[in-house]
Image (spheres, rainbow, N blue to C red):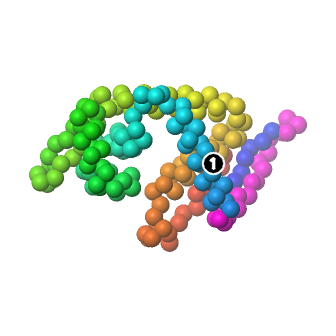
Amino acid sequence: MRRLQKEHNCFYYRTIVIRHDASPPLAADIRRGVTRLSRRLRAERSADALSANKLCVLSHLYPNKQCSPGEISSAEHLQPQSLSKLLAELESEGLTVRSKSPADGRQFVLKITQKGRRALQHDMSERDLWLASALQHLSETEVQLLHITARIMERLADFDVNSSQAQESQPVISQTI
C-alpha cells in the first residue's frame, strides 16, 4: 500500500507492506475488538430501543424492497423457528407489513414500514453519534484504515468457509490510500 507523505516541504510516497496473516492470535484479537465495540455500541442505545433481533430484521429489510422470511433467515443467520415469532411481533407493532409474494402466491414477503424505518433510523443515529464523536479522537490515517476495515468486516460477515468463496479469495486491499 502506498501513502503520500510530506516531509521537509517535499511530498513522497511511502510503501507500507501489509502481511496476510490469518493466525489464531490475529483472529482472537479481531474477535475481542469487534466484541468490545459491539458491546459499547449496544450500551449507547436508549432503554426503549428495539431488541437486537428486531434491529437485525429491520436492517435487512431497510435497503431491500421486500424479502421472504427464508431470505432473511439465510442472510442474517437466524433460525426459522425463532424468526416466525419475531416477524409476528414486528408486524403487530406496525414496523413491517406482510403481503403475498408476486412470484409465488403460496408464500409471503415482508416490507419495512415508515414507522419501522423511523425506529431503525433512531436506533442507528444514537450509536452513530457516539461513534462519530469517538472517531474524532483518532488520526486521519486511523480513520482511513477503519473505513477500509469496515468494508472488510462486511465481507467477513458474508463469508462461508464451506463455499466456493474459500477458493476464490481476493486481496482485500488493492488501492492506494
* Nearest the eye: 48 or 38: 48
* Nearest the eye: 88 or 56: 88
Q: Which amino acid, by three-letter code, is at mark 1?
A: Gly
> The residue tagged with tag 1: helix, strand or loop?
helix
User: Residues in magenta?
Assistant: 7-24
Image quadrant for the N terminus? Answer: bottom right
Q: Image check: 131 left or right of 46? A: right
Residue name at image x 25 percent, y 31 percent: 94
Residue name at image x 52 percent, y 37 percent: 42
* Nearest the eye: 136 or 8: 136
Is 21 covered by the magenta stretch? yes
Q: Position of residue 139 (x, y in %)?
A: 72, 36
Residue bearing the label numbered 1: 33
Q: Position of residue 55 (x, y in %)?
A: 39, 39
Residue name at image x 70 percent, y 41 percent: 141
Residue 72 to residue 44: above or below: below
Looking at the image, can residue 168 be seen?
A: no
Is 66 covered by the magenta stretch? no
Q: Image check: 26 left or right of 171? A: right
